[in-house]
Image (cartoon, rainbow, N blue to C red):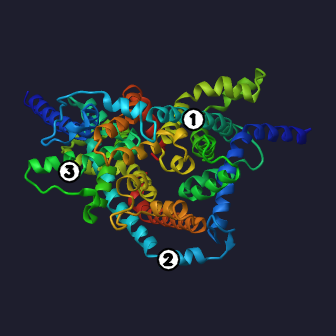
Amino acid sequence: MKGTARKRRDLTALFFLLPYLLFFVVFILIPLCHGLILSFQEWSLLSDPVWVGLQNYIELLDLRRFKAAVQNTFMFALESVPLLLIVPLLVALLLNKKFFGNRFAQNATISPFLIPSSSVLLLWIWMLDSQTGMINHGLRALRLQPQSWLSHQGSAMGVIVFVTLWWTAGFNIILYLSSLQDLPPELYEAAAVDGANGWNQFWHITLPLLRSRMLFICTLQIIGSFKLFDQVYILTGGGPAGGTRTLAFYLYETGFRDFMFGRAAAVSWYMFILIGFFGLLQAKFLSRWLGEGV
Amino acid sequence: MLRLRRTSRERLVLSIVGIALGIAWFFPILWMFFSSLQPNSELLIYPPRIIPRVVTLENFRTILFSGRGVNVGRSFLISVFLSSMVTAGVLVTATPAAYAFARLHFKGRDVLFWLIVATLILPVQMFIVPVYLLLDRLHLLNTFWAIILPPIGPAFGVFLLRQFMLTIPDELEDAAKIDGCSPLRFLVQIVAPLMRPPLVSLAILTFLGIWNDLLWPMLVIYDSKIMPLQPALARIRGEYHGTFEAGTIMAGAFIAAIPVLVIFVFANRYIVKAISTSGISR
């Protein structure tokens, strides 16, 4: 009796789970295993896959392009993560105050992140055009030297960071604003009674309470850096001279331009290792900083 | 009195800073719109006219109806269709699965749940090559299925909904059971209405995710007749850039931007909620 009840219970669960599990197995579990196997194989479209052991992984370490891609990805993370952590915080602190025009400022700063990447990037190609772009028009008006922003090795990565900031800051602003609105007002009243000024309140109340939110944004941002593709693909195509070729872009080139599926799979496992490494590093160092603020 | 004057002066400063920031941030979008309204030749003139001197809809006509190589109008509709299909697929599969993980007791439940959730930490790049090869073998490349099916796999929806369902009190289910309500009816008639907020969040995030994706549709769809908006737009640069038709390109970019901006103005609150509930970390 008890056995049949249990069996019925398990069957009911299976009935609810089956549709999703089907998709999970076919599009997550199987590809994950296949990707791992692929990374130990050499396979281009022309020939059958051949087992080559660790060859893909070892070869990659010697490839100048791969090393440059790792370096570029790190550079992008190093420049964009602090900016995307701090600028949205400042904007959110401003928007958290009451003033005339707040609604407009909120919509203007938040809405760009909803616009599809191709639309945003075509817009910035136009803005940054070396001849007729608005940015260079502005520079000319200020009697400054116009630049060819996207074809200059010194500026291309900076432009990608800037456009990414303009485009995606809104997402982090939302995250900060929702945290700021949850902060208990009593704390600020008490602090004001004790004579703490705005800066002290920010430093000793707001910032500590935002720690876990900042950690969360930091994690998202680092993972996001490894995914950086659209900006590179549309703005620079990885150039000039490979200066903006990121890991995600390198993976795309390896797999879908050169059709080296085995090597591309190995690149994706390296990405996993790097992201995992950062995850652990963050957990170790930042959890201490986070302290009791969780 | 003195204090009142101080706060009103402070508000004035905040207003000026806030509005200036808003204008600076919004300027590129405004320029996208004003560029799209001008004949392409006007855009080559220095100094530039921010407020158009000649207004024309020619650029929109070109990009929507006589598009070279790509048809932005059709791609727009394809994107609406595909994003809706994926959203429906995610909601229909994730809801019962989340229900099973949150409310039903069965053997191996927690192990299975954490196994599924653990895959969320894997970067999407790990799936690109093997899923592409899988779709190739199934002969689904260059069909809508290649875009609709794979995004239903990731566990994000199941995780989000399950966390919310855990907060529904057990008593509700017990009461329903006593009244002879089956689990399926309980899910559809009682849980689903309570689940409106997370379901709306999940729907918005899924829809936007597919609407905004570039890499995947670019890889799996190569026929421009069935191409979604994002890869189609990425292509119009090649068609119109060399011929200095910036206004036409901006018309295409603006058409892609307009629905999300309109949705944002009307559903602002829901989107903000969707984003802030997805950042569950707090």
Q: Residue A283 appears at what percent x and percent y?
A: 47, 62
Return the mark for residue B87: 1
Q: Quadrant of residue A72?
A: bottom left
Q: Secondary structure at mark 2?
A: helix
Mark 3 vs mark 2: in front? 3
One can see residue A88 in this view: no
Q: Residue A143 appears at what percent x and percent y?
A: 7, 52
Query: What is the chain identity of the residue bearing mark 2?
Result: A
Q: Is residue B74 left or right of residue A141?
A: right
Q: Secondary structure at mark 3?
A: loop
Return the mark for residue A69: none
Q: Earlier in the sequence, mark 3 or mark 2?
A: 2
Residue designated by label 2 = A61
**How many angstroms separate mark 1 from mark 2 (CA)?**
40 Å
Q: Residue at x 32, y 47 (%)?
A: B241
- The type of residue carrying mark 2 is Leu
- The type of residue carrying mark 3 is Gln
- The type of residue carrying mark 1 is Thr
Q: Residue at x 77, y 41 (%)?
A: A14
**How many angstroms separate mark 3 from mark 2 (CA)?**
41 Å
**How many angstroms separate mark 1 from mark 3 (CA)?**
43 Å
Residue designated by label 3 = A131
Q: Secondary structure at mark 1?
A: helix
In the rendered view, would you say A89 is above or below A82? above
Q: Residue B129 appears at what percent x and percent y?
A: 59, 58
